[in-house]
Image (tube, rainbow, N blue to C red):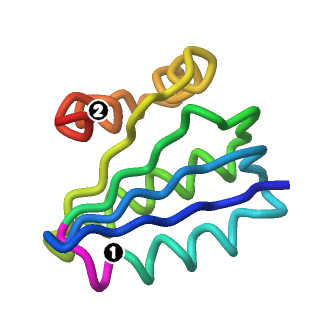
Amino acid sequence: MLNLFVSANTDGDVEIRAKGKLRYAESTTVANCLNSLIRVHKRVVINLAELDAIDAAGIGVLAAAYQRGLGQGTAVSLSRVPGRVRELLELARLGHLLSNQAAAAA
């Protein structure tokens, strides 16, 4: 199970805090949520500090959100990525998603 907590500011930025497990079962719902936010915000930060587990579908959702953001002029970045999730992203050759982490913290 995954819970998403969304908070927006007046600058057009939004942060999504993911708590729980991002797996295949949740991937469609999470993708739809991210797509909706990417359409209306300038910057979307996905906070993964409380993410307990992620599978290939979850990694795919994050990668697709990043690509969709590029196409729509929305900066999509990850923040507070746990070590095990960081390792999986790097193994999947998606380390470029992590390169935005410093910008997300600013």
Q: Quadrant of the C terminus?
A: top left
Which residue type carries mark 1? Ile
Q: Quadrant of the N terminus?
A: bottom right
Disc sitting over residue 93 in the figure: none
Residue 25 covered by magenta stretch: no
Range shown magenta: 38-42
Q: CA distance from mark 1 to mark 2?
A: 17 Å
Residue 8: horizontal and vertical position, in percent? 34, 69
Front residue of 84 and 12: 12
- Of the numbered discs 1 and 2, the one sitting upstream in the chain is 1
Above or below residue 61? Residue 102 is above
Q: Residue furthest front?
A: 10
Q: Is residue 19 above or below residue 34?
A: above
Image coords of residue 3 (percent x, y): 72, 58
User: In the image, is 86 to the left or to the right of 84?
Assistant: left
Q: Quadrant of residue 44?
A: bottom left
Q: Residue at x 44, y 61 (%)?
A: 64
Is 63 placed left or right of 33 in the picture? left
Q: Amino acid at mark 2?
A: Gln
Q: Position of residue 16 (x, y in %)?
A: 48, 57
Q: Residue at x 79, y 57 (%)?
A: 24
Q: Residue at x 44, y 51 (%)?
A: 63
Q: Residue tagged by mark 1?
A: 38
Residue denoted by label 2 = 101
